[in-house]
Image: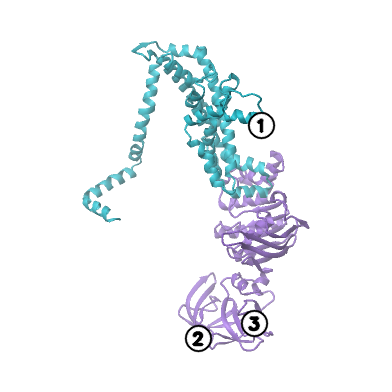
Amino acid sequence: MSDIQVDTLRKEFSSDGGPIVAVNDVSFTVEDGEFVCIVGPSGCGKTTLLRCIAGLERPTSGSITLAGEEVTDIPPQNRNLAFVFQDITLYPHMKVWENISYPLKLDGVDADTRYERAQEVADTIQIGELLDMYPGDLSGGQQQRVAIGRSIIRSPRAYLLDEPMSDLDAKLKKEMRVELQRIQQQVGGTMVYVTHDQEEAMTLSDRMIVMDDGEIQQFGSPQQVYHEPNNVFVAQFIGSPEINLLSATCRDDTGGTVTVDDTGWNIETGIASQGVPENVTFGFRPRHTNVEPVEDLDGLGGEVALVEAVGDENILYIDTEVGEIRAVVDIERTPIEEGDTVAVDVERSYLFDGATGTTVAHSTRRGDQPDDQVEA
Amino acid sequence: MSVVSDRVTALVPTRWWQRSNEILSGVFEDDRRLLAVCLTPALALYVLVAILPMLWAFNLSLYEVSTLNPVWEWTGPGRLVDILTSGAFQAAFGRSLIFGFGSVAFQIVVGVSLALLVNREFKGAVLARAVALLPYMVPAVAIGMVGQFMLNAQYGIINLVLIRVGILNNPVAFLGLPETAMATVMVVGSWKFAVFVTLLTLARLQSIPENFYEGATMCGANAYQKFRDVTLPRIKNVILIAALLRTLWMFNKFDIIYIMTRGGPGEETTTIPLHAYEVAFNQYDLGQAAGIAALMFVFLALWSIVYFRVARPEEEVRVA
């Protein structure tokens, strides 16, 4: 097991319209035994970054160090890294045990020993009874388990996983997520996991890297990323339903009060900062709201256009003068129906620089407890 | 639709349209009728050009028939035994084995290597693939004639080059010497058909997903191991099929050998088909020639059956 250091890594692809920068001078360190997710929208460079670490792509510049050993110029087969692909690359002509123990075959281990080792690994990932079947006879979830089995059999330096669950259905995904965490605890080991699914990243990671446009937007624990986003992009990408963002004006530089543009709504943010610019984006998460039905609306709020029931929560889509606002309410405590006029009280606010999108301040007001649960 | 086709449609009565639609959909819904409709033309053609002549040849082999005499004289199945025990037939059969299996071995090795080569991604790969497949378009007659020219001892380019490079001291009549004639015919007759193997193999190679190789790389496989564990299992069956087809066709090969050597020098390159030709048109013994052909057919049929039993090329490799 080992840590992974990535230093000013850059990967450009050539195209007809000049080079495309997929990974733009990215630096970070994944600690030994850490589970790190790289999350971002499609085309943000996350898979390219992972393939560079694996050695399947040659970086344009920069370096990759595994456990202190620089591997940038070492071919992938000699890096001793395990890679689980999005499209499960099992060999259809090999039985499950042969697939799992394929890395050992390459090391020249005899068939009997390989079968035994495959049996051990298969028991760990709970597919012990499938050893003599062919991959074509297995379900998607079983196939992905076999692929994971193949990656853990040789005790690699680190595991690299490229959206391994994106082809599985939602229920299976949840099961496999738990399974993967169990396997990681059992075998230990550094894991780098690429996904476009922020929920997956939030639940799996020790720390997560949020990427956009080839650059790291934020690297931190799921708590940090959720509660203290670096910028508008991270705030928007992480958390579901999506954060509400309204352009606003801040009259004093403390950020204590903002006026939502095109309205007369003055909102107390509870922020006591300094140097807040005049032109800001005011943000608040749908879960950090109090919603009350009102007769006459005076301030932030509007008519409830849609109520989406998710378990014992309701997601409200509220039409306001400045567009749609989302709020999450408890079904029993706040019975609200479509067509009601509601006022929205913001419990916790974020202020982003209106021009650059960088976070300038966020409140630590009401409802902010240290053990506040991360809702993904 | 154009104005013209609109007019044409308008001329056809609606009832007729409906009726033909009903008949057609009836055919397509009934599997057995569909089968009959689709199979009959091919089957009729096959019977006409393959089965009937074959039966006719079998029948012919039981008679004494001269090319110049219309009277058929019954000799019976003993004729086939006579052919089998004749020295000329046995010698020709031995040469057929050498020519057939030698050619196929050459074609498989060259064909598969060529396929692996042009399957790689490089600048101009598409052009290279096209060029590699070109020899298959060249007629056997042209290959034979050009081969003769190039191999000629007096003015052939091959002798010239070999002497210039220093491999040979004196020109060699490759097609005229008993030691070299068979090997030379095999090589010249095979390079075109190696492309057939390339064609089949390349199609299969291109269907292997790239991530299989990446997966193997991440497991630690080197280039040879990737070939052994990913490529070979995928192309094994197509190679077996190509080998069977090529063996059958090379055993029956007549044109290229006849053009280049006429079976010579002496009898060095007289394989079964050339032997049969000689018996029919030089010795004017059509009956015996038909007997040779019939025996050849029996041998190839047996060979195919054994081959399918042993090699099992029809067993599809698991791809999913």
> Looking at the picture, do discs 2 and 3 lie on one chain?
yes
Quick one: label 2 or label 3, which is nearer the N terminus? 2
Residue B55 in view here: yes
Residue A22, picture quadrant: bottom right
| Image spot of residue A212 (x, y percent) | 62, 67
Query: Is disc 2 in contact with disc 3, using a CB cutoff of under 8 Å?
Result: no
The subunit carrying tag 3 is A
- Mark seen at residue A294: 2
| Image spot of residue B89 (x, y percent) | 50, 15
| Image spot of residue B271 (x, y percent) | 51, 20
Q: Amino acid at mark 1?
A: Val
Q: Residues within 10 Å of mark 3 (few under 14, many from 20)?
A: few
Q: Is residue A243 above or below residue B161?
A: below
Residue bearing mark 1: B165
Q: Is residue B233 above or below residue A174?
A: above
- Chain (cyan): B
- Chain (purple): A
Which of pointers 2 and 1 indicates the residue nearer the eye? Answer: 1
Residue bearing mark 3: A366
Number of disc labels: 3
Distance in Å between CA atoms under marks 1 and 3: 93 Å
Quarter holding the N terminus of chain B is bottom left
| Disc 3 element | loop
